[in-house]
Image (spheres, rainbow, N blue to C red):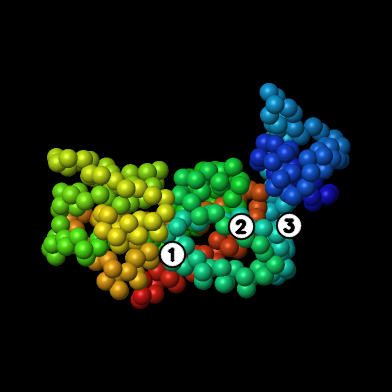
Protein backbone atom coordinates (compact mmCIF):
# COMPACT_ATOMS: atom_id res chain seq x y z
CA UNK A 1 0.00 0.00 0.00
CA UNK A 2 1.35 3.42 -0.99
CA UNK A 3 2.53 5.35 2.08
CA UNK A 4 2.07 8.79 0.48
CA UNK A 5 -1.57 8.01 -0.27
CA UNK A 6 -2.22 7.13 3.37
CA UNK A 7 -0.44 10.25 4.56
CA UNK A 8 -2.48 12.35 2.12
CA UNK A 9 -5.69 10.70 3.35
CA UNK A 10 -4.83 11.71 6.94
CA UNK A 11 -3.98 15.31 6.05
CA UNK A 12 -7.14 15.86 3.98
CA UNK A 13 -9.21 14.43 6.83
CA UNK A 14 -7.39 16.57 9.41
CA UNK A 15 -7.55 19.85 7.49
CA UNK A 16 -10.89 19.23 5.77
CA UNK A 17 -9.56 20.54 2.48
CA UNK A 18 -7.71 19.21 -0.57
CA UNK A 19 -6.16 22.65 -1.06
CA UNK A 20 -4.85 22.94 2.50
CA UNK A 21 -3.48 19.39 2.33
CA UNK A 22 -1.65 20.29 -0.88
CA UNK A 23 -0.09 23.32 0.83
CA UNK A 24 0.93 21.25 3.85
CA UNK A 25 2.49 18.50 1.72
CA UNK A 26 4.13 20.97 -0.70
CA UNK A 27 2.38 19.67 -3.78
CA UNK A 28 -0.55 20.59 -6.03
CA UNK A 29 -4.25 20.08 -5.46
CA UNK A 30 -4.56 17.83 -8.55
CA UNK A 31 -1.79 15.63 -7.10
CA UNK A 32 -3.75 15.33 -3.86
CA UNK A 33 -6.92 14.45 -5.77
CA UNK A 34 -5.01 11.80 -7.74
CA UNK A 35 -3.63 10.18 -4.60
CA UNK A 36 -7.04 10.08 -2.91
CA UNK A 37 -8.70 8.68 -6.04
CA UNK A 38 -6.01 5.98 -6.31
CA UNK A 39 -6.41 5.06 -2.64
CA UNK A 40 -10.20 4.88 -2.98
CA UNK A 41 -9.83 2.63 -6.01
CA UNK A 42 -7.34 0.41 -4.17
CA UNK A 43 -9.61 0.10 -1.13
CA UNK A 44 -12.83 -0.06 -3.13
CA UNK A 45 -14.55 2.59 -1.02
CA UNK A 46 -15.32 6.31 -1.13
CA UNK A 47 -13.39 8.19 1.56
CA UNK A 48 -14.66 11.75 1.12
CA UNK A 49 -17.74 13.59 0.01
CA UNK A 50 -18.46 17.26 -0.58
CA UNK A 51 -21.22 19.00 1.34
CA UNK A 52 -21.87 22.77 1.17
CA UNK A 53 -18.40 23.31 -0.24
CA UNK A 54 -16.74 21.34 2.55
CA UNK A 55 -14.72 18.13 2.27
CA UNK A 56 -16.09 15.60 4.76
CA UNK A 57 -15.24 12.01 5.57
CA UNK A 58 -17.78 9.41 4.56
CA UNK A 59 -18.83 6.92 7.22
CA UNK A 60 -16.36 4.43 5.71
CA UNK A 61 -13.66 7.10 5.69
CA UNK A 62 -14.26 7.71 9.40
CA UNK A 63 -13.98 3.99 10.04
CA UNK A 64 -10.69 3.63 8.14
CA UNK A 65 -8.96 6.82 9.33
CA UNK A 66 -7.68 5.38 12.67
CA UNK A 67 -6.11 2.46 10.80
CA UNK A 68 -4.32 4.82 8.41
CA UNK A 69 -3.10 6.92 11.34
CA UNK A 70 -1.74 3.81 13.05
CA UNK A 71 0.08 2.62 9.92
CA UNK A 72 1.74 6.02 9.40
CA UNK A 73 2.61 6.27 13.10
CA UNK A 74 4.20 2.82 13.16
CA UNK A 75 6.15 3.60 10.00
CA UNK A 76 7.63 6.69 11.60
CA UNK A 77 8.42 4.73 14.77
CA UNK A 78 10.24 2.16 12.66
CA UNK A 79 12.34 4.91 11.13
CA UNK A 80 13.14 6.25 14.60
CA UNK A 81 14.16 2.81 15.83
CA UNK A 82 16.48 2.51 12.85
CA UNK A 83 18.17 5.73 14.06
CA UNK A 84 17.33 7.67 10.92
CA UNK A 85 15.87 10.72 12.66
CA UNK A 86 19.09 12.63 11.99
CA UNK A 87 18.47 12.12 8.27
CA UNK A 88 15.08 13.83 8.40
CA UNK A 89 14.66 17.06 6.52
CA UNK A 90 11.90 19.49 5.65
CA UNK A 91 10.45 22.40 7.60
CA UNK A 92 9.49 22.68 11.26
CA UNK A 93 6.98 25.49 11.77
CA UNK A 94 7.65 26.56 15.34
CA UNK A 95 5.62 29.01 17.42
CA UNK A 96 7.28 30.59 20.45
CA UNK A 97 6.14 32.84 23.28
CA UNK A 98 8.50 35.78 23.67
CA UNK A 99 9.42 34.80 27.23
CA UNK A 100 11.09 31.69 25.81
CA UNK A 101 12.98 33.79 23.24
CA UNK A 102 14.68 35.67 26.09
CA UNK A 103 15.69 32.51 27.94
CA UNK A 104 16.71 29.10 26.57
CA UNK A 105 15.66 29.28 22.91
CA UNK A 106 19.22 29.82 21.52
CA UNK A 107 20.44 26.67 23.29
CA UNK A 108 17.43 24.79 21.93
CA UNK A 109 18.35 25.73 18.36
CA UNK A 110 21.95 24.66 18.87
CA UNK A 111 20.82 21.22 20.03
CA UNK A 112 18.16 20.94 17.33
CA UNK A 113 20.74 21.62 14.61
CA UNK A 114 22.95 18.86 16.02
CA UNK A 115 20.07 16.39 16.07
CA UNK A 116 18.48 17.30 12.71
CA UNK A 117 21.08 19.18 10.63
CA UNK A 118 19.02 19.09 7.42
CA UNK A 119 16.00 20.77 8.97
CA UNK A 120 14.69 24.24 8.10
CA UNK A 121 12.79 26.11 10.82
CA UNK A 122 10.15 28.80 10.38
CA UNK A 123 9.75 30.75 13.65
CA UNK A 124 6.65 32.65 14.73
CA UNK A 125 6.90 34.73 17.92
CA UNK A 126 3.42 35.60 19.20
CA UNK A 127 1.07 35.55 22.18
CA UNK A 128 -0.27 32.21 23.38
CA UNK A 129 -3.81 32.68 22.05
CA UNK A 130 -2.50 33.10 18.49
CA UNK A 131 -0.04 30.22 18.83
CA UNK A 132 -2.84 27.98 20.04
CA UNK A 133 -4.89 28.91 16.96
CA UNK A 134 -1.90 28.04 14.78
CA UNK A 135 -1.68 24.59 16.35
CA UNK A 136 -5.39 23.97 15.89
CA UNK A 137 -5.45 24.96 12.22
CA UNK A 138 -2.14 23.12 11.65
CA UNK A 139 -0.27 26.21 10.44
CA UNK A 140 2.19 25.42 13.27
CA UNK A 141 3.79 22.02 13.94
CA UNK A 142 4.96 22.79 17.48
CA UNK A 143 4.59 25.68 19.93
CA UNK A 144 6.23 26.70 23.19
CA UNK A 145 3.38 28.54 24.88
CA UNK A 146 1.51 29.07 28.13
CA UNK A 147 -0.29 25.76 28.15
CA UNK A 148 -1.49 23.15 28.18
CA UNK A 149 -3.65 23.08 25.06
CA UNK A 150 -6.61 21.01 26.24
CA UNK A 151 -7.80 19.63 22.92
CA UNK A 152 -8.16 16.09 21.53
CA UNK A 153 -5.18 14.87 19.49
CA UNK A 154 -2.89 17.48 21.08
CA UNK A 155 0.24 16.42 22.96
CA UNK A 156 1.49 18.63 25.83
CA UNK A 157 4.97 18.30 27.34
CA UNK A 158 5.66 20.31 30.48
CA UNK A 159 8.41 22.92 30.25
CA UNK A 160 9.88 25.20 32.90
CA UNK A 161 7.96 27.97 34.64
CA UNK A 162 8.88 31.64 35.00
CA UNK A 163 8.13 33.60 38.19
CA UNK A 164 7.13 37.23 37.63
CA UNK A 165 8.50 40.20 39.57
CA UNK A 166 7.52 43.84 39.86
CA UNK A 167 10.18 46.25 38.63
CA UNK A 168 10.52 49.97 37.97
CA UNK A 169 13.06 52.57 36.98
CA UNK A 170 14.99 53.98 39.94
CA UNK A 171 14.03 57.41 38.57
CA UNK A 172 10.50 56.83 39.91
CA UNK A 173 11.98 56.85 43.45
CA UNK A 174 9.48 54.36 44.81
CA UNK A 175 9.79 53.61 48.55
CA UNK A 176 12.15 50.77 49.54
CA UNK A 177 9.49 48.94 51.56
CA UNK A 178 6.56 46.68 50.84
CA UNK A 179 4.22 48.41 48.41
CA UNK A 180 0.45 47.96 48.29
CA UNK A 181 -1.43 47.70 44.99
CA UNK A 182 -2.82 51.20 45.56
CA UNK A 183 0.72 52.59 45.49
CA UNK A 184 1.58 50.68 42.31
CA UNK A 185 -1.62 51.92 40.68
CA UNK A 186 -0.40 55.53 40.94
CA UNK A 187 1.69 54.68 37.89
CA UNK A 188 0.66 53.07 34.56
CA UNK A 189 0.93 49.27 34.70
CA UNK A 190 3.12 48.17 31.79
CA UNK A 191 2.21 44.59 31.05
CA UNK A 192 1.38 41.76 28.66
CA UNK A 193 -1.11 42.05 25.79
CA UNK A 194 -4.80 42.12 26.66
CA UNK A 195 -5.51 38.70 25.15
CA UNK A 196 -3.12 36.93 27.56
CA UNK A 197 -3.54 35.14 30.88
CA UNK A 198 -1.13 37.46 32.80
CA UNK A 199 -3.06 40.55 31.71
CA UNK A 200 -6.37 38.98 32.74
CA UNK A 201 -5.03 38.14 36.20
CA UNK A 202 -3.39 41.54 36.75
CA UNK A 203 -6.34 43.59 35.52
CA UNK A 204 -8.77 41.54 37.61
CA UNK A 205 -6.66 42.10 40.74
CA UNK A 206 -6.41 45.85 40.23
CA UNK A 207 -10.13 46.10 39.50
CA UNK A 208 -10.75 45.21 43.15
CA UNK A 209 -9.21 48.47 44.36
CA UNK A 210 -11.51 51.15 45.74
CA UNK A 211 -9.40 53.91 44.25
CA UNK A 212 -9.48 55.15 40.66
CA UNK A 213 -9.05 52.40 38.02
CA UNK A 214 -5.47 51.45 37.17
CA UNK A 215 -4.10 52.50 33.80
CA UNK A 216 -2.65 49.72 31.64
CA UNK A 217 -0.05 50.06 28.91
CA UNK A 218 -0.29 46.60 27.36
CA UNK A 219 1.91 45.20 24.60
CA UNK A 220 2.52 41.88 22.85
CA UNK A 221 6.26 42.76 22.89
CA UNK A 222 8.11 42.12 26.14
CA UNK A 223 11.02 44.11 24.73
CA UNK A 224 8.68 47.10 24.43
CA UNK A 225 7.43 46.57 28.00
CA UNK A 226 11.02 46.49 29.24
CA UNK A 227 11.92 49.67 27.32
CA UNK A 228 8.91 51.59 28.64
CA UNK A 229 9.74 50.52 32.19
CA UNK A 230 13.40 51.51 31.89
CA UNK A 231 12.31 54.94 30.64
CA UNK A 232 10.12 55.43 33.71
CA UNK A 233 6.75 55.33 31.96
CA UNK A 234 5.31 53.00 34.59
CA UNK A 235 5.84 49.90 36.73
CA UNK A 236 5.89 46.43 35.25
CA UNK A 237 5.78 42.76 36.15
CA UNK A 238 8.17 40.70 34.01
CA UNK A 239 10.10 37.41 34.19
CA UNK A 240 13.74 37.57 35.29
CA UNK A 241 14.98 36.28 31.91
CA UNK A 242 13.73 39.46 30.23
CA UNK A 243 15.22 41.97 32.69
CA UNK A 244 18.27 40.24 34.24
CA UNK A 245 20.82 42.56 32.60
CA UNK A 246 18.87 45.69 33.52
CA UNK A 247 18.65 44.61 37.18
CA UNK A 248 22.42 44.01 37.27
CA UNK A 249 23.18 47.37 35.66
CA UNK A 250 20.74 49.26 37.90
CA UNK A 251 18.53 50.44 35.05
CA UNK A 252 15.69 48.66 36.84
CA UNK A 253 15.07 47.89 40.51
CA UNK A 254 12.99 45.07 41.94
CA UNK A 255 10.00 46.16 44.00
CA UNK A 256 8.84 44.55 47.24
CA UNK A 257 5.09 44.17 46.72
CA UNK A 258 2.14 42.79 48.67
CA UNK A 259 0.96 40.83 45.64
CA UNK A 260 2.64 39.25 42.61
CA UNK A 261 0.92 37.52 39.66
CA UNK A 262 1.13 33.75 39.26
CA UNK A 263 4.20 32.35 37.59
CA UNK A 264 4.02 31.56 33.88
CA UNK A 265 3.64 27.83 33.11
CA UNK A 266 4.78 26.71 29.66
CA UNK A 267 4.33 23.56 27.59
CA UNK A 268 5.71 22.23 24.33
CA UNK A 269 2.47 21.43 22.51
CA UNK A 270 1.97 19.75 19.14
CA UNK A 271 -0.70 17.78 17.25
CA UNK A 272 -0.06 14.06 17.60
CA UNK A 273 -2.13 13.27 14.48
CA UNK A 274 -0.80 13.16 11.83
CA UNK A 275 2.34 11.96 13.58
CA UNK A 276 5.28 14.34 13.12
CA UNK A 277 8.58 12.80 14.28
CA UNK A 278 10.46 16.11 14.06
CA UNK A 279 7.90 17.88 16.26
CA UNK A 280 8.15 15.07 18.81
CA UNK A 281 11.95 15.13 18.73
CA UNK A 282 12.01 18.94 19.09
CA UNK A 283 9.54 18.81 21.99
CA UNK A 284 11.69 16.24 23.79
CA UNK A 285 14.76 18.44 23.29
CA UNK A 286 12.87 21.44 24.66
CA UNK A 287 11.86 19.53 27.79
CA UNK A 288 15.47 18.66 28.61
CA UNK A 289 16.87 22.10 27.81
CA UNK A 290 14.18 23.98 29.75
CA UNK A 291 14.76 21.74 32.76
CA UNK A 292 18.50 22.44 32.69
CA UNK A 293 17.74 26.15 32.37
CA UNK A 294 15.41 26.18 35.38
CA UNK A 295 17.96 24.26 37.50
CA UNK A 296 20.79 26.67 36.67
CA UNK A 297 21.78 28.80 39.71
CA UNK A 298 21.80 31.90 37.47
CA UNK A 299 18.05 31.56 36.85
Depth check: give the residue in front, 43 or 228. 228
Q: In 3D space, how far apart are the residues under numbered discs 2 and 3 (Cα atoms)?
A: 26 Å
Disc on the earlier residue, 3 or 1? 3
Q: SS at mark 1?
A: loop
Say few, some or many: other residues with alpha carbon within 10 Å of mark 3 (under 14 / 14 to 19 / 20 or more): some
Q: In 3D space, how far apart are the residues under numbered discs 3 and 1 (Cα atoms)?
A: 37 Å
Q: Is residue 260 left or right of 101 when viewed as pictured?
A: left
Write the residue at 50% across / 55% down: 125
Write the residue at 38% across / 66% down: 241
Disc on the earlier residue, 2 or 1? 1
Depth check: give the residue in front, 229 or 134. 229
Residue 129 position, x and y percent, is 46, 45
Give the residue at mark 1: 102
| Quarter assignment of residue 163 | bottom left
Q: Is residue 213 left or right of 123 when viewed as pictured?
A: left
Give the residue at mark 2: 122
Q: Is residue 185 left or right of 87 when viewed as pictured?
A: left
Write the residue at 73% across / 57% down: 75
Residue 180 position, x and y percent, is 15, 53
Q: Are marks 2 and 3 in contact (CB under 8 Å)?
A: no
* 210 shown above or below 249: above
Residue 297 position, x and y percent, is 35, 76
Residue 160 position, x and y percent, is 42, 63
Give the residue at mark 3: 75
Q: SS at mark 3?
A: helix
* 126 shown above or below 107: above
Q: Can you say which quadrant of the picture contains the C terminus? A: bottom left
Evaluate whether residue 12 shows in this view. Answer: no
* 213 shown above or below 237: above
Depth check: give the residue in front, 220 or 22. 220
Write the residue at 60% across / 59% down: 280
Q: Are marks 3 and 1 in contact (CB under 8 Å)?
A: no
Amino acid sequence: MNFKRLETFIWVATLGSFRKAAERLYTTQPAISTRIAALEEELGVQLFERESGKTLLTSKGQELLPFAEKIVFMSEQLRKRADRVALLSGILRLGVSETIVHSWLPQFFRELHKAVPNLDVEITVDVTSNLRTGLMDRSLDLAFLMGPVSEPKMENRELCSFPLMWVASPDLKLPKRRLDLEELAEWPIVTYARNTKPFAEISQKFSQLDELPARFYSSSSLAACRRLTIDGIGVSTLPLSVIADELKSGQLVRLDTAWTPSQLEFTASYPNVPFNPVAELAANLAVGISKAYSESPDN
